[in-house]
Amino acid sequence: MQRIWYSAVLLVGSLLVSTGATGQEVSAYRSVDRSTVRAPAFMRIYGPASPPHGFVRFCEKRPEECSGDGGPENRFYASSDRLSELDAINRLINQAIAPATDLEVYGVKEHWTLPSTRGDCEDYALLKRRMLIARGWPVSSLLLTVVRDEKGDGHAVLTARTLQGDFILDNKFEDIRLWTRAPYEFVMRQSYLNPQVWVALDARHTPVSTALSGVQNRR
């Protein structure tokens, strides 16, 4: 697992160097239209939710990836450079990792991990989260999130919780976007108070009990 993680770091690092993409040098936040930032910019929490069982297993194997950092609980102020950094990491990981199901890669229906060359939605989100934490983003601002996509299937994305709004990093889209601009039904996400706790984002499922393809609840 360590070898896989280091391979991913080297791959993404080489992409950052080759594109000249650093926190100061990234040209975009090009995809975020400030004129569209309207209420509700922030997700509403409706109560507790059961964590996806793949996430629970991941934390059992990699507890260091599921612990808090003792950082601030307040929303993170994301400067233009920081928002550009979100955009750059989203694009780079989407380019670096080829899409593949857990069944194709690991022979099981669900396996959350830090990918090296191939992975599915939650693997993209985990790697983006890891890379952003390494670049100084607080744990409380990077929240794994489960949604139903435009087809009604389970899907995982990464939410960046900032003063400017809740932004989505998604392997289906190259640009980052406010959560209200994503074509999804938001179901649950990590709590910013404790990364091992999950909360419901849908008032109809409190606590969440609906099984989602690829991100089923633990039974």
Image (cartoon, rainbow, N blue to C red):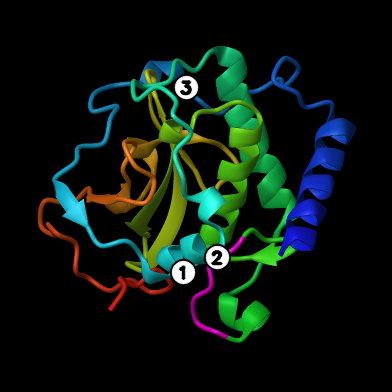
Q: Residue 171: tell me if it is visible.
A: no
Residue at horizontal 62%, vertical 50%?
127
**Magenta part mainly helix, strand or loop?**
loop
Judged from the image, the secondary structure of the residue bearing numbered disc 3 is loop
Q: Are marks 1 and 3 in contact (CB under 8 Å)?
A: no
Give the percent coordinates (x, y) of residue 145.
38, 50
Residue at the spot of label 2: 61
Judged from the image, the secondary structure of the residue bearing numbered disc 1 is helix
The residues colored magenta run 108-113
The vertical placement of 132 against 24, above or below, is below
| Amino acid identity at mark 2 | Lys
Residue at the spot of label 3: 33
Left or right of 69 on screen, residue 131: right
Query: Sequence-wise, which precedes: disc 1 or disc 3?
Result: 3
Q: Do the residues labelled 3 and 2 touch (CB within 8 Å)?
A: no
| Amino acid identity at mark 1 | Arg
Q: Residue 45: tell me if it is visible.
A: yes
User: Is 121 part of what is drawn in magenta?
Assistant: no
Q: Which quarter of the figure has residue 38?
A: top left
Residue at the spot of label 1: 57
Of the residues tagged 1 and 3, which is closer to the observer?
Answer: 1
